[in-house]
Amino acid sequence: MEAFLEALQHLPPDHFVKSEAFTKTVHRDEYGSINPVSPALSQDGKVIVITGASQGIGKRGLAKQFARAKPRAIVLAARDVAKLAETAEYIRAIEPSVQLLSVATDVTSEVSVKTLFDKVEDAFGHADVLVNNAGVSLGYTKVDGMELDLWWQNFEVNVKGVLLTTKYFLRLLGTAPGTIINISSSAAWNIEEEGAAYCTSKLATVKLGQQMAARPNVVTVALHPGMVETDMSPSFMLKFHEDTPELPGGMAVWLTTDGARFLSGRYVSANWSVDELVERKEEIVNGDLLKVALTGKVGRDQWK
């Protein structure tokens, strides 16, 4: 660990953004193509459900940017009632026309999640977009020194939580078109024993989204929010966390548009240029890129 921390000190602030770039152009703040006030990104008539909406990216990025796109309603879900009220006040100041529903929700509890979507149905009749943002990063230690309950809490929130909200969103959605955005992390690809709990839980959400994308009416994308400073940011990583929360928020809004449908079942980073992703659409689709898959040739045909 000491060697790792020493190495970090010598890296430039944009190291992780550039080393994980899929597009030549990378962004660290909102830009034209993901500006929520653009008519092309309008959420008119839609009902948006956001978990983990009481703080951080959920509040200052996702809820804010979806509100600027003027949907019919935004459903704010999180455990902390007081902080949810603060988020609602924050959003009303940005866009008073948007209806808001705040629901105290524990995503690890099926009863709580069912109640959330019952309230969504009672209030609005349906939901169009689910953003699974609630997440934790706990038990940063090597496996042989872990506390199992703490380690496993990553899976309770990051995987079980996503599974439960997805279950009840899909039930409410039926055959209507809908979008699920799972806030993931580039940590899904990291080989880092101390972070095994968080990394593997985030990888699981990428794969879960890939499975859900098999539904013809559902677009599901795993979104790495970039390097945004939040309460979960380790102190030794703060110098790299220079992205604004508006960046992943705007990217999430863009992912709900028809122009982003080709990314269903895939992983993308908020830092990547959506313009270049669209330019590379044929390459991405035909090459089956940006998906979780086994590398290496398998099957008996390889010996023919």
Image (spheres, rainbow, N blue to C red):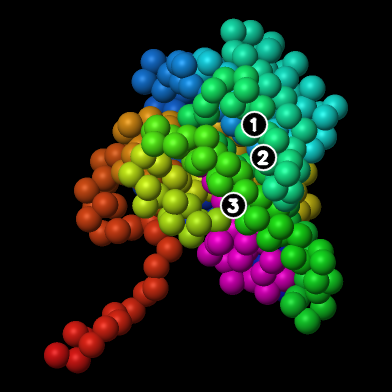
- In the picture, the quarter occupied by the C terminus is bottom left
Q: Residue furthest top?
A: 97
Q: Secondary structure at mark 2?
A: helix
Residue beneath the point at 69% across and 11% down: 93
Give the amino acid type for the residue marked by disc 2 in the picture: Lys
Residue 137 falls within the magenta-colored stretch = no
Pointer 3 with pointer 2, Cβ within 8 A: no
Label located before the other in sequence (3 or 1): 1
Crowd rating for badge 1 (residues with CA inside 10 Å; few <14, some 14–19, many 20+): some
Residue beneath the point at 62% across and 23% down: 122
**Which residue is more in the foreground, 132 or 271?**
132
What percent of the width, then of the height, locates residue 184? 57, 51
Between the C-alphas of marks 3 and 1, the distance is 17 Å
Identify residue for label 2: 114
Between the C-alphas of marks 3 and 2, the distance is 12 Å
Residue beneath the point at 73% across and 41% down: 112
Label located before the other in sequence (3 or 2): 2
Compared with 218, 104 (above or below) is: above
Region rendered in magenta: 181-204
Give the amino acid type for the residue marked by disc 3 in the picture: Leu
Identify residue for label 3: 163
Left or right of 154, for residue 250: left
Q: Main secondary structure of the magenta part?
A: helix
Identify residue for label 1: 118
Residue 189 falls within the magenta-colored stretch = yes
Left or right of 218, for residue 168: right
